[in-house]
């Protein structure tokens, strides 16, 4: 899809109540079928992120001590989970809209637990939606902060956000 077409469509969705986020999600899931992320494309996407990691390493950047700034986490936090898998322990995610969905994040985490990243750390990521000792899951960004070193900042206010709503982060 041309970026101009997508931009126009997203602008139109933004005019709807709640920014059209639910309709946007519905369209991506049922019309374009780009959500959940197609499993067969995950290795290709991860390889693209691996090239970024190799560029950092070729310049002598120590990933485990660094801080990655990310703009727009998306629905499944794929980029953030992959960069964590490659050794980036601290990430700050700037979002204009809180789109992340636990079921999509859990799908990526489950896939990567069963299919480790080439050259990445071997780790099993606990699904974020799992209950712990019968208690409901902790708020999404609290869990991501503990498990993947991610914190989210709301781009409009600049404030660090730890949303209590588990549907969106």
Image (cartoon, helix red, strand yellow):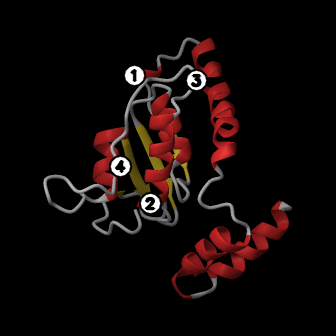
In primary-sequence order, the first of circles 2 and 3 is 2
Front-lying residue, 66 or 87: 87
Residue 46's disc is none
> Which residue was labeled with disc 4?
127
Q: Quadrant of residue 136?
A: bottom left
Please state, as top left, top right, bottom left or bottom right, where the C terminus lies in the image: bottom left
Q: Residues within 10 Å of mark 3 (few under 14, many from 20)?
A: few
Q: Residue at x 58, y 15 (%)?
A: 57
Q: Tell me residue 127's x, y (percent).
A: 35, 49
In primary-sequence order, the first of circles 4 and 2 is 2
Q: Is residue 152 left or right of residue 130?
A: right
Q: Quadrant of residue 24?
A: bottom right
SS under mark 3: loop
Residue 103's disc is 2
Q: Is residue 1 left or right of residue 90?
A: right
Tag 2 near tag 1, CB within 8 Å:
no
In primary-sequence order, the first of circles 3 and 4 is 3
What is the spatial separation of the Cα atoms under label 4 and label 2, in whole angstroms? 9 Å
Camera-side mark, 1 or 4: 4
What is the spatial separation of the Cα atoms under label 1 and label 3, in whole angstroms? 21 Å
In primary-sequence order, the first of circles 1 and 4 is 1
> Which residue was labeled with disc 1?
65
Q: Tell me residue 61's x, y (percent).
A: 52, 17
Q: Residue at x 47, y 48 (%)?
A: 93
> Which residue was labeled with disc 3?
118
């Amino acid at each position: 899809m041309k970026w101009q077409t997508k931009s126009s469509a997203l602008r139109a969705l933004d005019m709807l109540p709640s920014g059209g986020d639910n309709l946007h999600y519905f369209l991506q899931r049922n019309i374009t079928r780009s959500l959940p992320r197609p499993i067969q494309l995950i290795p290709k996407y991860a390889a693209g992120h691996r090239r970024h990691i190799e560029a950092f390493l070729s310049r002598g950047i120590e990933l485990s001590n660094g801080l990655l700034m990310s703009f727009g986490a998306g629905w499944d936090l794929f980029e953030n989970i992959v960069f964590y898998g490659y050794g980036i322990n601290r990430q700050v995610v700037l979002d204009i809209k809180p789109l992340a969905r636990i079921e999509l994040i859990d799908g990526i985490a489950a896939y990567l637990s069963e299919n480790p990243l080439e050259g990445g750390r071997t780790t099993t990521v606990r699904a974020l939606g799992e209950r712990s000792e019968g208690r409901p899951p902790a708020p999404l960004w609290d869990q991501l902060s503990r498990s993947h070193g991610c914190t989210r900042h709301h781009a409009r206010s600049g404030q660090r956000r730890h949303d209590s709503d588990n549907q969106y982060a």
